[in-house]
Amino acid sequence: MPVMDDDYAWQLIQDARNSRRVAPATLGDMNVQRTSIVIDESYGWQFDGELSVSVAALLDTLLPVALGGPDFVIAQLGQSLDGRIATESGHSHYVTGEASRVHLHRLRALVDAVIVGAGTVAADDPQLTVRHVPGANPVRVVIDPRARLAADRKLFNDASASTLHVVGPHAPASPPGVERVVLGCDDEAMDPAAILGLLAERGLTRVLVEGGGVTISRFLDAGLLDRLHVVVAPMLIGSGRPALSLAPIEKLHSALRPSCKSQVMGDDMFFDLDLRASYQP
Ligand SMILES: Nc1nc(O)c(N)c(N[C@@H]2O[C@H](COP(=O)(O)O)[C@@H](O)[C@H]2O)n1
């Protein structure tokens, strides 16, 4: 009986992404012993062989991302049980556990571009690479309307991936070696649709909005997210930076109630929200 291990499953998922396949699809080679996975329109999959619970979880969480379409926007949040992503001072390394970080690196490897706000870069100094998994680094996109970030940030200096510095019309100079893109904006807030538009002009249509909470909230409020992955750690921070802060609603019937799948992810709980059907027309 064929066996699918973690490495082979990840290879198939990456192949699907690299060949720009969309569901329904059959991945793998019918002619070799390790055989194929058949995936339907709803990302349900069938594999006639042996696989572990963790490989099944990998397929459940990442096939919808790899096969989500040529234009696909996903966001991820790693938060505490009380909905915080960092302390008041911005300390966030780490809220969620190692399995969740590997998942995040896999998400990065499945997109063309990863977006972060200037606040996240100032507080976390992230690298935004896929160093925990085999795969290709995405283009890093920093939303920095006033170009306030210091030139010493890692993603301005590490050549393992390219970086787009998206700034407002009156912003001072960008750090050397990064591509600067000027986008009109009122004050602090850049239009999320305009950001996706400038990425699309560069062929970057599969996008991960990685943080922070404010940036993800803006994309969610604008109705631009296809999916949201939320990893909840059994930790109570009690104060600090909130995960999501959306436009207020008066009644609960206005709340988003996306279809949701959940599973244990290491010491954390993982929620996969399909937002496509949740937004009001
Ligand atoms: N999923 C998740 N869980 C946590 O606990 C986190 N702190 C984050 N943070 C994200 O990862 C970025 C750091 O990336 P590098 O390791 O430097 O590549 C950080 O900026 C957040 O976007 N995510």
Image (tube, rainbow, N blue to C red):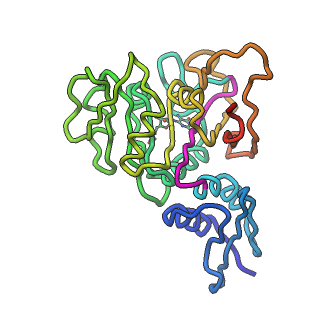
Q: Quadrant of residue 242?
A: top right
Work out whether residue 270 can be spotted.
no
> Quick check: is 37 in the magenta stretch?
no
Q: Quick check: 8 left or right of 148?
A: right
Q: How many marks?
A: 0
Q: Residue at x 59, y 69 (%)?
A: 8
> Quick check: is 73 in the magenta stretch?
yes
Up/down of 223 relative to 9, above or below: above
Quadrant where the N terminus is found in the figure: bottom right
Given residues 29 and 169, the one toward you in this image is 169
Q: Residue at x 45, y 27 (%)?
A: 191
Q: Which residue is drawn at 62% across and 54% down?
A: 62
> Whole-percent x and y of residue 188?
40, 18
Q: Quick check: 160 left or right of 213?
A: left
Quadrant where the C terminus is found in the figure: top right
> Whole-percent x and y of residue 131?
44, 52
> Whole-percent x and y of residue 96?
60, 37
Q: Which residue is drawn at 68% across and 46% down?
A: 265
Q: Quick check: 18 left or right of 243?
A: left
Residue that protrudes farthest toward the top in the picture: 250
Span highlighted in magenta in the image: 68-82
Given residues 158 and 162, the one toward you in this image is 162
Work out whether residue 72 can be spotted.
yes
> Whole-percent x and y of residue 199?
40, 43
